[in-house]
Image (cartoon, rainbow, N blue to C red):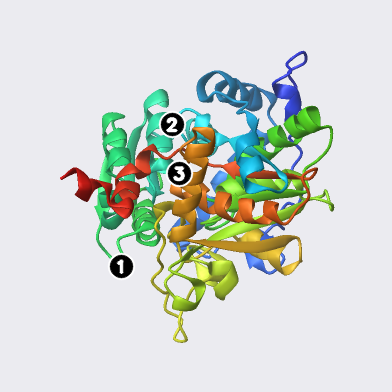
């Protein structure tokens, strides 16, 4: 199905056909599925039915696209970073500027879509998990706009390192619920949100933040984020007259990666690169590289690659970026890796920090630490390519939320005192 808004240049960029869909059980190859408490099986099936009904409804897309254009600020620019490209000495680097959306990251694309589904299903309350805080802010934003009660689950560790976003959520009217269990990070926030949903699913909609979780969430989140790659595809054809040679995105759970990469999936000449958080280094064990170092197992309702020990216990992860500090990955990315369509790369904390400073000083753009991992790997890849080739890097968010972490890492707060 194509957009039904004739005469709109904005709407014409979006193809609404669902391609590479999972099977009826939500499986991408052997990955995915719906492994959840019996109490949640019916709510998940109701969300699946509501999604497919909405996706076939022109009025749903008309409202969604109107909000994306006039509220979110889409289409976001595809920016040719000429100074960065010249300093890097390789391929031409283009940045997909998701940092310029309302709320400052790609997450709002998904919360607009799921918020509309929640309203369509007459739910009065929404809940969400958040790591870096951007999904929490985006959920709180949509809840405020639609007049819904909103509770956000966030690990205590993440609250400490992302306090600006905690304050933004509270200002928007959301209740931020600290999670102290486990490592007090994203994994544990998901656990607590799921526990709450079991008890409240009758009047509550869980706005899941990444392309993981039990079916139908990996499909929902991917579809609501494909605006990123569909725009980038149309924009690079207009600006450069051809498709990119490489498309690069960072990966925690996989929302921004699926958003950029999926629309290029059938373009065999375009290399698709997922960049994981290498933390202190892949050999140290202190990282969050589930695809590179994990194995197949069940996490948060789906079969995917995850980091677990020999006894099947989920391992502790580490990343300087809260949004990538997660021990699993979306099932579709796991499937794409096994079928040979996805290439892996990784960036350490130090490499991400260096990439953040490089982009800031070469282009005047301060990226999120999550996005900085994609920048580090994308720039390294570009260096090995010809100057007439093209790399698109998804700049999934802006770095305002990370300034305390960045300044502490650089020692600037100590200098100021």
Is residue 151 at all visible to an observer of this figure?
yes
Q: Are marks 3 and 1 in contact (CB under 8 Å)?
A: no
Find the distance from the CA under tag 3 to the CA under tag 1.
Answer: 25 Å
Task: Assess disc 1: are there few (<14), some (14-19) or many (≥20) residues with their C-alpha within 10 Å of its C-alpha.
Answer: few
* N-terminal-most mark, 3 or 1: 1
Give the mark nearer the N terminus: 2 vs 3.
2
Are dots 2 and 1 in contact, CB under 8 Å? Answer: no
Q: Position of residue 23 (x, y in %)?
A: 72, 58
Q: Which mark is residue 326?
A: none
In the image shown, does 254 or 223 lie closer to the viewer?
254
Which label sits on residue 368?
3
Q: Nearer the viewer, residue 204 or 91?
A: 91
Residue ranking furthest to the left: 417
Residue at mark 1: 182
SS at mark 1?
loop
Left or right? Give the position of 234 relative to 115: right
Circle 3 SS class: loop
Q: Is residue 401 left or right of residue 305?
A: left
Residue that protrudes farthest toward the top in the picture: 7
| Closer mark to the observer between disc 2 and disc 1 | 2
Q: For the residues carrying marks 2 and 3, which lies nearer the camera in this image?
A: 3
Q: Quadrant of residue 416?
A: top left
> Which tag, 2 or 1, sits closer to the chain's start?
2
**Mark 2 crowd level (few <14, some 14–19, many ≥20, 10 Å Cα):** many
Vertical side of 157 occupied by 47: above or below: above
Q: Residue at x 65, y 50 (%)?
A: 248
Q: Which residue is mark 2?
A: 103
Residue 294 shows up from this direction: no
């Amino acid at each position: 199905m194509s957009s039904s808004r004739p005469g709109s240049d904005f709407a014409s960029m979006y193809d609404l056909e669902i391609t590479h869909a999972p099977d009826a059980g939500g499986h991408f190859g052997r990955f995915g599925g719906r492994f959840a408490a019996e109490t949640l099986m019916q709510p998940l099936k109701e969300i699946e039915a509501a999604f497919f009904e909405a996706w076939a409804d022109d009025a749903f897309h008309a409202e969604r696209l109107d909000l994306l254009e006039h509220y979110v600020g889409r289409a976001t620019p595809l920016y040719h970073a000429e100074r960065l490209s010249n300093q890097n000495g390789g391929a031409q680097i283009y940045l997909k500027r998701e940092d310029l959306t309302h709320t400052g990251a790609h997450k709002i694309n998904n919360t607009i879509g799921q918020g509309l589904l929640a309203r369509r299903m007459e739910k009065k309350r929404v809940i969400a998990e958040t790591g870096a805080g951007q999904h929490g802010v985006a959920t709180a934003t949509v809840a405020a706009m639609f007049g819904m009660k909103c509770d956000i689950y966030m690990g205590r560790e993440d609250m400490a390192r992302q306090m600006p976003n905690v304050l933004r959520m509270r200002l928007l009217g959301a209740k931020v619920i600290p999670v102290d269990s486990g490592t007090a990070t994203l994994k544990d926030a998901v656990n607590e949100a799921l526990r709450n949903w079991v008890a409240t699913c009758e009047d509550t909609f869980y706005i899941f933040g990444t392309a993981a979780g039990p079916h139908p969430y990996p499909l929902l989140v991917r579809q609501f984020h494909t605006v990123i790659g569909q725009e980038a595809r149309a924009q690079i054809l207009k600006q450069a007259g051809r498709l990119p040679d490489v498309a690069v995105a960072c990966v925690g759970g996989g929302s921004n990666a699926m958003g950029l990469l999926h629309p290029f999936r059938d373009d065999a000449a375009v290399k698709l690169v997922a960049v994981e958080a290498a933390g202190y280094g892949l050999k140290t064990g202190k990282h969050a590289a589930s695809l590179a170092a994990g194995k197949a197992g069940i996490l948060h309702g789906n079969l995917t690659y995850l980091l677990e020990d020999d006894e099947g216990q989920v391992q502790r992860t580490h990343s300087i970026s809260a949004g990538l500090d997660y021990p699993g990955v979306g099932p579709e990315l796991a499937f794409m890796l096994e079928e040979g369509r996805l290439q892996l790369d990784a960036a350490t904390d130090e490499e991400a920090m260096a990439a953040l400073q490089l982009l800031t000083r070469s282009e005047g753009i301060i990226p999120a630490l999550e996005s900085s991992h994609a920048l580090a790997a994308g720039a390294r890849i570009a260096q090995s390519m010809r100057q007439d080739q093209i790399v698109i890097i998804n700049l999934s968010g802006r770095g305002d939320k990370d300034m305390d972490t960045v300044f502490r890492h650089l020692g600037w707060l100590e200098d100021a005192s």
